[in-house]
């Protein structure tokens, strides 16, 4: 199913939901990425159009959380036209949005060199471009899904989970985040969809998430034009808290440095003892 989502694309990297939904250090975490299989000549006008498009995406991200472009510079043929868009997570600041899009564009340059299209979904933003127009096209194909470990059958927890999913798929908003009990979640549509198309996409993502992840402690369901994610905050998010990991790493480093200093002191003392014994002889 994963490869059916974008048939002209080869998908590459997938990782699970990392850290808190609002933690800036998780913004650049890769969710999925893929590249077109069609290549273009390095010196072709298409490359110039792609470079211009990607620059426009980064510049626009400083003032907006969503935008799309059609780029065809003077001298370009119809086959050289490139289409692209970006979208940032709804709770990002303007600077966070721009940084996320800039990171995504930089990675796409290394991920998909010399090909006509690429897509990269980071935790904080989506960037996509292609030589075929996809803007405004509803697409509910599954591009990424992943479920956490089972929580077992816990009716109370499931009620909280379903309450969160119900809230996330509410009518009239392209981005929502909320929680109930230990469960929190986030949902978003790409804003080239109409409100009705967004609702339809989120509804399908939610039903697929309930079916695929059932009683899982966390779940991610990304369709081509929307996604829904939920997590047991007390388990999944806490265990992936970047601050907690930083504190542990710092403690380990301090311990290692202390151990090295003690070893140096002991070796130095042993060396002096040996010298003293030699002098005594």
Image: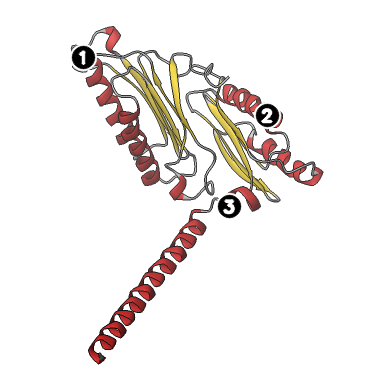
Tell me which label, 2 or 3, sits earlier in the chain: 2
Tell me which label, 1 or 3, sits earlier in the chain: 1
**Colour theme:** secondary structure
Label 1 with label 3: CB-CB less than 8 Å: no
Q: How many marks?
A: 3
Foreground tag (2 vs 1): 2
Q: Residue at x 25, y 86 (%)?
A: 278
Using the numbered discs, state the Cα–Cα distance from disc 1 to disc 3 in whole angstroms: 48 Å
Q: Which residue is mark 3?
A: 239
Quarter of the picture containing the N terminus is top right
Quarter of the picture containing the C terminus is bottom left
The image's mark for residue 118 is none
Q: Which residue is mark 1?
A: 44
Find residue 93 and report its horizontal and vertical position in percent: 42, 46
Using the numbered discs, state the Cα–Cα distance from disc 2 to disc 3 in whole angstroms: 23 Å
- The front one of 229 and 202 is 229
SS class of the residue under badge 1?
loop
Mark 1 Cα-neighbour bin, 10 Å: few <14, some 14–19, many ≥20: few
Find residue 20 and report its horizontal and vertical position in percent: 54, 49
Q: Which residue is mark 2?
A: 212
SS class of the residue under badge 3?
helix
Give above or below for 268 relative to 51. below
Residue 88, quarter of the rendered image: top left
Give above or below for 232 relative to 134. below
Find residue 14 and report its horizontal and vertical position in percent: 49, 32
Mark 2 Cα-neighbour bin, 10 Å: few <14, some 14–19, many ≥20: some
- The front one of 96 and 273 is 273
SS class of the residue under badge 2?
helix
| 164 sits left or right of 227 in the view | right
């Amino acid at each position: 199913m994963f490869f059916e989502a974008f048939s002209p694309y080869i998908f590459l990297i997938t990782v699970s939901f990392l850290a808190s939904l609002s933690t800036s250090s998780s913004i650049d975490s890769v969710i999925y990425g893929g590249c077109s299989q069609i290549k273009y000549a390095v010196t072709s006008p298409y490359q110039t159009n792609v470079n211009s498009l990607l620059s426009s995406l980064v510049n626009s991200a400083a003032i907006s959380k969503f935008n799309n472009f059609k780029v065809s510079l003077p001298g370009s043929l119809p086959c050289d036209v490139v289409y692209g868009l970006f979208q940032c997570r709804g709770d990002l600041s303007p600077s966070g949005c721009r940084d996320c899009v800039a990171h995504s564009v930089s990675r796409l340059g290394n991920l998909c060199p010399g090909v006509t299209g690429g897509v990269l979904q980071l935790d904080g933003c989506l960037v996509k471009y292609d030589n075929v127009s996809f803007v405004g096209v509803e697409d509910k194909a599954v591009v990424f899904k992943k479920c956490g470990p089972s929580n077992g059958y816990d009716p109370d927890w499931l009620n909280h989970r379903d309450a969160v999913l119900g809230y996330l798929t509410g009518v009239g908003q392209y981005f929502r985040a909320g929680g109930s009990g230990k469960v929190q979640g986030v949902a978003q549509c790409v804003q080239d969809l109409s409100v009705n198309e967004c609702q339809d996409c989120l509804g399908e993502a939610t039903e697929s998430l309930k079916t695929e992840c059932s009683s899982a402690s966390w779940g991610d369901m990304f369709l081509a034009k929307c996604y829904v994610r939920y997590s047991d905050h007390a388990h999944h998010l806490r265990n992936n808290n970047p601050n907690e990991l930083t504190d542990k790493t710092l403690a380990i480093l301090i311990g290692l440095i202390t151990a090295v200093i003690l070893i140096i002191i002991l070796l130095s003392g042993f060396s002096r003892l040996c010298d003293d014994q030699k002098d005594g002889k």
